Image (cartoon, rainbow, N blue to C red):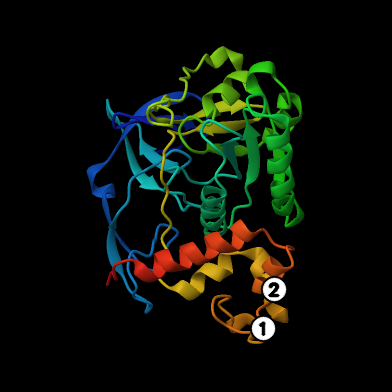
Amino acid sequence: MRKGFIKKYIANQYTLIDLETKEEVIAFARGKLRYVKLDEDSTFYRQTSMKTKKEQKIMTISPKVGDYVVYDDSEDQFLITEILPRRNDLVRPDVCNIDQVLLVFSAISPDFSFHLLDKFLVIMNQERLTPVLIISKIDLIGKEQLEALKKDLEYYKNIGYDIYYVNSKQRIGIDVLSEIFRDKISVLAGQTGVGKSTLLNALMPELELKTQEISKALGRGKHTTRHTELYRYNGGFIVDTPGFSKIEFVIFHVDEVRGFYPDFLKLSAECRFGSKCLHLNEPDCAVKHAVETKDMLASRYENYVAFCDEVKNQKDKY
């Protein structure tokens, strides 16, 4: 038995880096890995219903990119026999054990979406990950539009998020950006067409990843990255993932949403009902007051209300 790190997954084949020899091998998942009995203390446990009591369940567990695994090299075909505990576990993108997520948004084509940004940030906070924001295609947007976008994004900078503006084709901002990857496992995540592959090509020209323009008819890009893969870079790895047009979070109780808004938590001390304030219909709410005084972006609060409604209106799962 040997230990490895999953670098790539495609067509039911896992490319592993052997932790001892550093060689790459192709392995398959052993069938019995698919169904595992888990309790809530397991790093593989994911809440899938509104039940709040401790429960044990049988869940489908499959190896994914970023996993540390045990594999059997005694047969002609290498088999993954065990998945080691995960530090964190994302579903979209489908990777685990990462150090940082770089959320890539285009300034235009597709248009920047604060709704998508706030939803991403909720998911990152659920996984206890602090993302880095990358704004691409700054060369394609008008100067005034770009300045207005930067002004709104300054709010996110003030609450603790690092933001980088890049023009990948002309390598503007690339040299500064390259240093944040050093010795880390980083994920590039974002909508289809925001320029993740173009950014990777600027960082690592030798990859020559295919890119496609935004479809004018659909208003979005076509999928160019077909699978999830790790690329060695600056002492660490960068994970390129397939793009997508929609993401969903898994939250079952509306009072959980506020916990994923660090700026709301900070203001809660000033609310009449303190930490119990949902920041929706309560009087003397510091969060709503911050919106009124323009100390908080109106879109930030509007998205919060929309997410609360989304949780309230979802079908109950038990």
Taking depth in this image into account, of 289 and 57 the one nearest to the observer is: 289
Measured Cα–Cα span from mark 1 to mark 2: 8 Å
Quarter in which the N terminus is drawn: top left
> Could you tell me residue 31's position as x and y percent?
23, 44
Q: Mark 1, residues whose alpha carbon is within 10 Å: few (<14), some, or many (≥20)?
A: some
157 left or right of 12 in image: right
Task: Please report contact status of discs 1 and 2: CB closer than 8 Å, yes or no.
Answer: yes
Q: Identify which amino acid the numbered label 1 is placed on.
A: Asp
Q: Identify which amino acid the numbered label 2 is placed on.
A: His
Taking depth in this image into account, of 178 and 152 the one nearest to the observer is: 152
> Could you tell me residue 167's position as x and y percent?
67, 24
Position above or below: 62 against 315? above
What residue do we see at 37% from left, 79% from top?
53
Position above or below: 25 against 181? above
> Could you tell me residue 186's position as x and y percent?
59, 38
Taking depth in this image into account, of 128 and 193 the one nearest to the observer is: 193
Q: Secondary structure at mark 1?
A: loop
Mark linked to residue 284: 1
- Location of mark 2 (residue): 289
> Could you tell me residue 57's position as x and y percent?
29, 66
Taking depth in this image into account, of 20 and 264 the one nearest to the observer is: 264
Q: Secondary structure at mark 2?
A: helix
What residue do we see at 69% from left, 47% from top?
153
What residue do we see at 62% from left, 27% from top?
137
47 left or right of 101 in image: left
Residue pushed farthest left?
31
188 left or right of 309 in image: right
Residue pushed farthest bottom?
272
Q: Is residue 173 visible?
A: yes
Mark linked to residue 89: none
On the image, which quarter does residue 282 sit in? Answer: bottom right
On the image, which quarter does residue 178 sit in? Answer: top right
